[in-house]
Image (tube, rainbow, N blue to C red):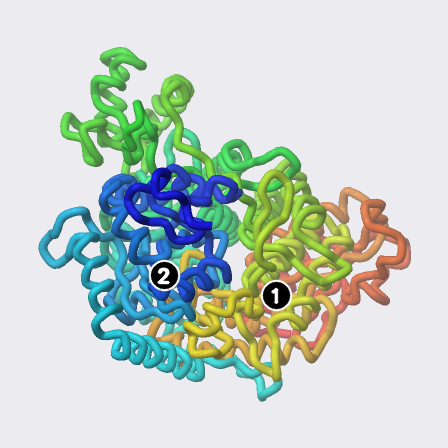
């Protein structure tokens, strides 16, 4: 019912006029529950209201840890006059991009097409059918050079809607048609001839990446600079391909990037973990939010660098310390009761009601002197680039050496670090977004399990198992074959998982199986793959989502969308190709190998034109080119079997799958043996032995670590 005029004196008396975000579980949506804007969550009800009122939808997309989202909220969404205008002429809708990446993806594409830029906060104006007709990102409260004020934009859009409706709707339909046509160019059929990966194509991709590398600071491109996690995985796999003419170049590029990030302000030198990105090319000024998806991927990449053996630029021992610190931070800071991992820590710290970007992490020479005394304080300030002028704000600068520490500096740092961390812990801390995202937790399972195997840390493997158990218990409905994307307080809610969620969870479970031998995790990964085939493959075409929203479907021209490009995480298509390849190696399924090859058909046009957004496809292509190698360990449990298993887990063979026979008391009765282990036996005396196979050809079983390593080296060199 309309609100009485006395209760709503500004005339915003449309039905249900109120901000209804207070009951939403999303931390980001709840951040806006106190705004005078009458926000509604994304859904049919909001769009039906827009149709009934004959007004556009104003769609604002962001996430809880987003600094500029906080800025626009304070400047515009907390301003009563702006809110009154917005409420009177639009239906305002808030979306947490991490909760609804399907919504974020389609309207990000529209925003980039309309405005030429993308980012968050994202501001999009939609018809009641969900079609975008105007968009931008952050709008200031007053006009700035090249950027109108938010109020100017609202008034111009309202005027166009009232005075030029036909043209507005025609443009919206045209944009949707263009987006549909673009989808046709990236369509994947899973019933066609598979792509045969060309080794030269992968080498060419390395050469193209080298042209955009920053050889001084490491990484690619200029500021802002993001951690290139998927690309680094490809470069590390490529470096392990001994026959490749660009293997050394790949290893050098990966080493420079990993060293540059690890020694910079992007990496929290006190507590471990990585920030989202750097606003400077030399990684010296981070944008301070810490995301689970970044740290899960980087943990795995640093562990794989250790597995590769490192190089002079970035020794494996240093990488092992970084990986351990990242894992410890992730579990301590994002771990939740019950086993799941939270999404992020905010970029801002709130002090006396004021947001300070990175406030928890900044130091001045004076604050260092106060904690450490004048002598150590001066030495640490010089060593960690803390000057009188703060690089972030008047609060100071982040700690970072930007170079390798000398032996004496390392001793000093290890001595003072506990005191600095204890002092920092007394400060106000950034807020935590406690929603659990299935796919990101899947990436974390892979990182924790593989790091545990490489670093000989069973505690990390155990933590990976707890995360996997949480996902199975809370997110997975085996009866319906449905994986729910998000949970809060151990309760699943919202949309079904997207292709990326199924793929990343299966990826993590396969990694956990390879380290533990617990075949229950293998069987759960298999169920996810089968469910994904049912959910995301229609008439031979692969899609990122299963049509959770009619408005999203309309906005993309009523075609199922598949985005082939990596973003902060690998694309769903690339992730699915990777798990299909892994599954085919474990199971012997020719059909799933063909499906992986079909998706790799996306690779040729991307490998040399845009390799920076095709890292996981390239990594999967490298694994396919390598076989991948299939390793099966059979025979009685013993210290030798553990040594053989450890040697395989520490092999850098691209995409290698590892299966080990276990008594497996942790698996339910009735779960059959993993196909790769069927008919595999120990030596005649029962001692363990390893079977190594590639491309349906197996070598003779071997029973020592030296023989395993020798055979893997021969396989990498192309010998049989």
Please say whether residue 324 is visible from this viewpoint.
no
Please say whether residue 69 is visible from this viewpoint.
yes
For the point 27% across and 47% down, the residue is: 84
Tell whether 225 sits left or right of 151.
right
Q: Is residue 308 above or below residue 720?
A: above
Instruction: Tell me the element at label 2.
Output: strand
User: How far, Cα to Cα, is label 1 from label 2?
Assistant: 39 Å
Q: Position of residue 341 (x, y in %)?
A: 56, 41
The mark lying in front, picked from 1 and 2, is 2
Q: Is residue 395 above or below residue 265?
A: above
What is the crowding at mark 2: few (fewer than 14 residues within 10 Å), some, or many (at least 20)? many
| Nearer-the-camera pick, 506 or 184 | 184
Q: Are marks 1 and 2 in contact (CB under 8 Å)?
A: no
For residue 4, what is the image quadrant?
top left
Residue 579 is marked as 1
| Nearer-the-camera pick, 615 or 630 | 615
| Nearer-the-camera pick, 636 or 515 | 515
For the point 73% across and 62% down, the residue is: 480
- The residue carrying mark 2 is 57
| Nearer-the-camera pick, 182 or 557 | 557
Q: Position of residue 494 (x, y in %)?
A: 58, 53
* Residue farthest along the bottom direction in this orientation: 193
Q: Earlier in the sequence, mark 1 or mark 2?
A: 2
- Which of the image's four quarters has the C terminus? bottom right
């Amino acid at each position: 019912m309309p609100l009485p005029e006395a209760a709503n004196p500004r005339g915003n008396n449309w039905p249900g006029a109120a901000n209804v975000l207070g009951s939403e579980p999303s931390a980001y949506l709840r951040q806006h529950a106190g705004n005078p804007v009458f926000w509604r969550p994304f859904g049919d009800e909001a769009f039906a209201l827009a149709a009934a009122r004959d007004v556009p939808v104003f769609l604002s997309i962001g996430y809880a840890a987003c600094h500029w989202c906080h800025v626009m909220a304070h400047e515009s969404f907390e301003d009563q006059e702006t809110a009154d205008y917005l409420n009177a002429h639009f239906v305002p809708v808030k979306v947490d991009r991490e909760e609804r990446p399907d919504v974020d993806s389609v309207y990000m594409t529209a925003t980039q097409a309309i405005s030429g830029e993308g980012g968050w906060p994202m501001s999009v104006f939609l018809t009641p059918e969900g079609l975008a007709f105007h968009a931008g990102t952050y709008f200031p409260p007053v006009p700035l050079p090249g950027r109108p004020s938010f109020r100017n934009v609202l008034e111009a859009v309202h005027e166009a809607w009232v005075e030029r409706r036909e043209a507005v709707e025609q443009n919206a339909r045209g944009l949707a048609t263009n987006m549909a046509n673009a989808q046709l160019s990236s369509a994947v059929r899973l019933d066609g001839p598979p792509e045969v990966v060309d080794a030269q194509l992968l080498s060419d991709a390395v050469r193209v990446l080298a042209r955009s590398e920053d050889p001084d600071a490491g990484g690619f491109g200029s500021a802002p600079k993001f951690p290139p996690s998927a690309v680094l995985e490809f470069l590390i796999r490529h470096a392990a391909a001994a026959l490749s003419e660009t293997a050394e170049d790949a290893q050098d590029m990966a080493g420079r990037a990993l060293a540059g990030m690890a020694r910079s302000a992007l990496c929290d030198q006190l507590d471990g973990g990585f920030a989202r990105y750097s606003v400077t090319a030399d990684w010296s000024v981070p944008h301070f939010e810490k995301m689970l998806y970044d740290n899960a991927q980087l943990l795995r990449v640093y562990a794989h660098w250790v597995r590769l053996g490192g190089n002079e630029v970035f020794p494996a021992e240093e990488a092992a310390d970084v990986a351990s610190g990242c894992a410890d931070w992730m579990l301590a800071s994002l771990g939740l009761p019950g086993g799941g991992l939270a999404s992020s820590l905010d970029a801002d710290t709130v002090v006396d009601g004021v947001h300070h970007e990175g406030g928890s992490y900044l130091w001045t020479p004076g604050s260092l002197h106060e904690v450490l005394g004048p002598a150590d304080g001066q030495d640490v300030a010089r060593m960690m680039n803390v000057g009188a002028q703060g690089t972030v704000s008047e609060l100071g600068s982040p700690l970072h050496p930007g170079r390798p520490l000398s032996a004496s500096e390392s001793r000093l740092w290890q001595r003072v670090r506990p005191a600095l961390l204890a002092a920092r812990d007394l400060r106000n801390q950034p807020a935590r977004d406690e929603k659990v995202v299935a796919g990101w937790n899947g990436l974390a399972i892979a990182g924790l399990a593989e790091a545990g195997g490489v670093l000989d840390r069973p505690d990390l493997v155990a933590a990976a198992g707890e995360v996997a158990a949480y996902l199975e218990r809370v997110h997975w409905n085996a009866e319906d074959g449905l994986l729910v994307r998000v949970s809060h307080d151990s309760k699943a809610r919202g949309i079904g998982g997207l292709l990326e969620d199924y793929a990343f969870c299966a990826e993590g479970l396969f990694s956990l199986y390879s380290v533990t031998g617990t075949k229950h995790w293998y069987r759960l990964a298999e169920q996810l793959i089968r469910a994904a085939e049912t959910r995301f493959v229609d008439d031979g075409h692969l899609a990122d989502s299963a049509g959770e929203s009619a408005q999203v479907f309309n906005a993309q021209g009523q075609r199922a969308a598949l985005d082939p490009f990596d973003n902060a995480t690998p694309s769903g298509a690339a992730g699915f190709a990777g798990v299909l390849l892994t599954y085919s190696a474990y199971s012997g399924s020719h059909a799933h190998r063909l499906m992986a090859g079909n998706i790799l058909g996306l690779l040729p046009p991307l490998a040399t034109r845009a390799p920076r957004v095709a890292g996981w496809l390239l990594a999967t292509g490298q694994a396919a080119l390598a076989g991948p190698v299939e390793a099966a360990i059979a025979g009685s449990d013993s210290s030798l079997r553990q040594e053989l298993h450890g040697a395989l887990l520490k092999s850098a063979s691209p995409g290698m799958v590892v299966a080990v026979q276990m008594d497996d008391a942790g698996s339910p009765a009735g779960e059959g043996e993993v196909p790769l282990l069927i008919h595999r036996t120990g030596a005649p005396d029962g001692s363990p032995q390893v079977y190594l196979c590639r491309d349906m050809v197996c070598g003779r079983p071997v029973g020592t670590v030296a023989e395993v390593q020798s055979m893997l080296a021969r396989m990498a060199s192309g010998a049989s």
